[in-house]
């Protein structure tokens, strides 16, 4: 198998892993098997699976290695007697020898076939436009093959979209023209493989961002699970980000909507970002300030509890607060009992009093 970054000497496309590349025995350059190498796919995979090397030279080295002039007969050298021509005797086929049949290769799951850009006619390509579909909040265009495009230029009645795969070396030059709501792709083929399911992945990401802005208190993992259950079907989607990456997108979206961190204790508390029936006290003592949080149900459990257990942590608080104190108690349900935190106090001091 091939794993290098050299370009094919015929099509100038980078030779990637698992794409049937051959290396010239003389110059050491790479070339795709399909680019006029004369090696069939059956011979290639037979050699790969058996570990046999393929002796092959590129066209440039083959033409260079051939002699350009024929040798002239030396008159001083006596001519060699020509051997009489002996007709070849056709060998009788043996009953035990089976006839030569074409070898059938099993399809390997680990070695997928090379993507062919001409599998689907250009007339059957459909496009889908996503507003704010990119990471930077710009419009994104996705076609039915899985190729994605970003906006290159926009005029009064026409918009040009270019492929998003544009490295500094050998960028993809595929272009789509949008005019009067219709999309037309140019005749340039993509020089890279598509990303199947890009439309679904973009739709899931946009839906995750939308729900993150609507509900600021719902856990990020719960939002991701709800969107995946709603948008995803039974078919796999290779382009879909991992759930933990989607959860990070939720947290980054919420960070934009959150207010800036307070610099001192003299800040105004915005109750719109606090769930209803949760803030029960804002206590100021001299130069200290403490915020008390608990629901009505949690207060009822505290009043019924025989013992309270107090714990403090200092790693969860930011300046100007210094610690989070919790009041815990045992809550019983039928025959099971568990200690849970029932009251939370964000404190700006660490004194016991």
Image (cartoon, rainbow, N blue to C red):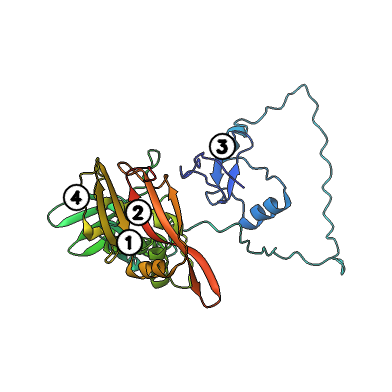
Q: Please report the residue visible at 84 percent of the width from the left and 45 percent of the height from the top.
A: 84
Q: Please report the residue visible at 20 percent of the width from the left and 65 percent of the height from the top.
A: 181
Q: Secondary structure at mark 1?
A: loop
**On the image, numbered disc 2 is attached to which residue?**
345
Marks 4/1: CA–CA distance: 20 Å
CB-based contact (under 8 Å), mark 3 and mark 2: no
Of labels 3 and 2, earlier in sequence is 3
Q: Please report the residue visible at 19 percent of the width from the left and 50 percent of the height from the top.
A: 268
Crowdedness near tag 3: few (<14), some (14–19) or many (≥20) residues, C-alpha within 10 Å: some
Pick whichever, 222 or 121, lies toward us: 222
CB-based contact (under 8 Å), mark 2 and mark 4: no
Q: Which mark is residue 217?
A: 1
CB-based contact (under 8 Å), mark 3 and mark 4: no
**On the image, numbered disc 4 is attached to which residue?**
268
Crowdedness near tag 1: few (<14), some (14–19) or many (≥20) residues, C-alpha within 10 Å: few
Crowdedness near tag 4: few (<14), some (14–19) or many (≥20) residues, C-alpha within 10 Å: few
Of labels 2 and 4, earlier in sequence is 4
Query: 331 left or right of 100?
Result: left
Of labels 4 and 1, earlier in sequence is 1
């Amino acid at each position: 198998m091939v794993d290098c970054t050299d370009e094919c000497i015929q099509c100038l496309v980078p030779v990637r892993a698992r794409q049937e590349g051959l290396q010239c025995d003389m110059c050491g350059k790479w070339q795709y098997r399909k680019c006029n190498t004369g090696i069939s796919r059956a011979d290639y995979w037979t050699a790969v699976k058996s570990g046999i090397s393929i002796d092959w030279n590129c066209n440039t080295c083959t033409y260079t290695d051939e002699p350009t002039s024929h040798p002239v007969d030396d008159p001083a050298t006596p001519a060699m007697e020509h051997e009489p021509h002996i007709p070849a005797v056709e060998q009788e086929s043996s009953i035990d020898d089976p006839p030569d049949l074409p070898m059938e290769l099993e399809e390997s799951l680990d070695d997928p076939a090379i993507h062919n850009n001409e599998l689907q006619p250009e007339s059957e390509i459909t496009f889908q436009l996503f507003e704010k579909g990119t990471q930077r909040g710009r419009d994104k265009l996705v076609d039915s093959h899985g190729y994605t495009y970003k906006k290159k230029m926009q005029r009064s009645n026409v918009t040009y979209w270019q492929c998003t795969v544009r490295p500094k070396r050998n960028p993809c030059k595929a272009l789509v023209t949008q005019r009067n709501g219709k999309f037309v792709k140019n005749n340039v083929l993509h020089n890279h493989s598509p990303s199947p399911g890009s439309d679904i992945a973009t739709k899931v990401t946009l839906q995750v961002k939308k729900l993150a802005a609507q509900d600021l208190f719902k856990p990020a993992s719960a939002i991701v699970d709800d969107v995946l259950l709603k948008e995803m079907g039974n078919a796999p989607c290779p382009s879909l980000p991992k759930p933990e990456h989607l959860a990070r997108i939720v947290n980054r979206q919420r960070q934009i909507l959150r207010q800036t961190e307070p610099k001192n204790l003299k800040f105004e508390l915005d109750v719109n970002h606090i769930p209803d029936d949760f803030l029960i006290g804002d206590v100021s003592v001299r130069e200290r300030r403490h915020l008390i949080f608990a629901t009505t149900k949690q207060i009822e459990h505290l009043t019924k509890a025989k013992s309270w257990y107090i714990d403090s942590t200092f790693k969860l608080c930011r300046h100007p607060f210094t610690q989070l104190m919790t009041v815990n108690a045992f809550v019983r349900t039928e025959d099971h009992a568990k200690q849970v935190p029932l009251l939370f106090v964000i404190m700006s001091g660490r004194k016991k009093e």
